[in-house]
Image (cartoon, helix red, strand yellow):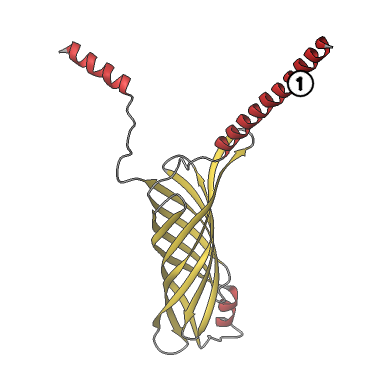
Amino acid sequence: MIRRVFIYAIAIGIFFGGQSAWCADKGRVENEEKVAAVQNRIFHKNHELAASVGYIADDPFFIIYPVSIGYTYNLSQAWGWEVARLQYFFNQERGLLKELKQPPFNVQPERFQEPIYMVNSHAVWRPFYGKSALLNRWVVNHETYLFAGPGLTRYETKYSFGQSTTEDAINISGGFGLKFFVNRKFCVNLEFRDIYNLRNDGGENNIYFGIGLGWRFNLTPRKVQEDPTLKKLDRILSEQEK
């Protein structure tokens, strides 16, 4: 009887001890996975200068190719402010406008507006950050960001008679982008922007697709953590040299 109780006690101890060890290992693994999955954004910088080219295809009279430069100040890892973004438009007349001007129509629209440039400022929110394996050979760090803000668009209004005039229209724009980090200094930006221009003759909506290159940097040097042992060794070596 005593022997049987002793055997049962050993069996129960082994069972629950194994369960505890398994749970501890499981908890440790889960914690390690959490630590590995959630990390600080190692490519975070306070400032970014960016240049990009884009395409606007929904203007009735022109195919528009915007070229832009901009500066963004990152308030934190999640929030930023695109302080200024300047876009200059290179415009190509659509076939419809060319056909109207040529025989047999020989018709010039009474008036049409050609965009010249645009200035914007946006609030930026970056909720997503992660890594992706490219062809199982390279790891690419990337983030997704949303933005919205006001701006100003300069138009040149051309008439079939008389001189051209200009108009400055307030615009509201928003969209999202994907940022792929090449290294700690450079990144590639893919963007979609929805721009609504409040012109005098009514609102006009334009859809923008673009790609750009960003240069990221800090104005103040990072704080370097010094190893006290190495610091002491360096001091000893310096004294010996004297």
Q: Residue at x 30, y 40 (%)?
A: 221
Quarter of the rendering containing residue 241: top left
| Side of 240 relative to 198 (left or right) | left
Residue assigned mark 1: 12
Residue 44 x, y percent position in the rendering: 43, 45
Q: Residue at x 42, y 55 (%)?
A: 51
Residue 210 x, y percent position in the rendering: 52, 58
**Crowd rating for badge 1 (residues with CA inside 10 Å; few <14, some 14–19, many 20+):** few
Quarter of the rendering containing residue 100: bottom right
Front-lying residue, 195 or 105: 195
Residue 54 x, y percent position in the rendering: 51, 60
Quarter of the rendering containing residue 18: top right
Q: Secondary structure at mark 1?
A: helix
User: In what quadrant of the picture does the N terminus appear?
Assistant: top right
Q: Residue at x 45, y 42 (%)?
A: 43
Front-lying residue, 227 or 83: 227
Q: Is residue 151 above or below residue 1?
A: below
| Side of 124 relative to 140 (left or right) | left
Q: Residue flagged by tag 1: what amino acid is it?
A: Ile
Q: Is residue 181 above or below residue 242?
A: below
Residue 31 x, y percent position in the rendering: 59, 34
Q: Residue at x 40, y 83 (%)?
A: 164
Front-lying residue, 192 or 10: 10
